[in-house]
Amino acid sequence: MKSGSEIKQWYNVYSENQLKTGTNLRHYTIFNRLKQSGLKKKHSVLEVGCGIGTLTKLIHDYLKKGELVATDISDKSIEIAKTRIPGSKKINFLVTDMKDFEYPKKFDFIVFPDVLEHIPVEQHKDLFAISNRHMHEKSIVLINIPHPKALDYLRLHTPEKLQVVDQSISAYTLIKNAYASGMELINYTSYSLFYEEKDSVLVRFKKANNVTLRPLPRNKIIRRKFIERINYFLAKGSF
């Protein structure tokens, strides 16, 4: 397993390559998924693994009255990110590997934008526990990662495109570590981003809490049943 200093040094060099790519489809997609998940302009957001600040800039410019904390293990990446958002009072950049992360506020959203696959999986349980400590009851953790099978394919056919740590993270491993840290799954969705096949995964978690069941009004249940019966008869008649 690579040490933290080795990973940091690799990304200090890699940050120069990221400048050539800039803001791409993935960054816009993740931002729009945050928006669809309920991100408001007054919210507070923690971005883990901000790199040179591509997604960071999109979130920052949207948060009119909110606050953004952007972290990365690479001090060089943070230096570059700061130049993209100079002089802003609503963002705080921190160089950290998140192992000892502490912040005086809880966040409405915590986002891992294609970063978990680059953090040794042995650290994920503790990372989720740290995240959980910085969540309130309505906080959402949004994770984007490569689909594990897509990453397996790239590892076999184009390993030169992979980063210093690039793990295939199964749904089982991801959910197990999150649940062990006091979170529960909202949804796990595979989707196509750069390939015709599903090459990416979007996952959302919330803080685990006791379930409360509130019965629906009877007329709403009857209406739902009516719609489902119509759909059934339409499907039945189509054969």
Image (spheres, grey):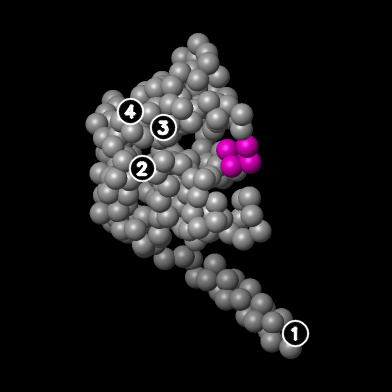
Q: Mark 2 points at which residue?
A: 119
Q: Which mark is residue 238?
A: 1
Which amino acid type corresponds to the residue marked 2 in the rendered image?
Ile
Q: How crowded is mark 1: few (under 14 residues within 10 Å), some or many (20 or more)?
A: few
Q: Which mark is residue 121?
A: none
Along the polypeptide, which appears first: circle 1 or circle 3?
A: 3
Q: Mark 4 points at which residue?
A: 96
Residue at image coords 25%, 44%: 126
Along the polypeptide, which appears first: circle 1 or circle 4?
A: 4
Q: What is the x, y in percent for residue 101? A: 28, 30
> Where's the N terminus, which quadrant?
top left
Which amino acid type corresponds to the residue marked 1 in the rendered image?
Ser
Residue at image coords 55%, 31%: 18
Q: Does the magenta stretch include residue 147?
A: no
Give the alpha-carbon distance from disc 1 to disc 3, as whole Å.
Answer: 58 Å
Q: Magenta residues?
A: 23-28
The tally of labels here is: 4
Along the polypeptide, which appears first: circle 1 or circle 2?
A: 2
State whether residue 5 is above or below residue 216.
above
Q: Name the residue under label 3.
A: 10
Which amino acid type corresponds to the residue marked 3 in the rendered image?
Trp
Say left or right for 238 vs 160. Answer: right
- Assess whether mark 4 and mark 1 are in contact (beta carbons under 8 angstroms): no
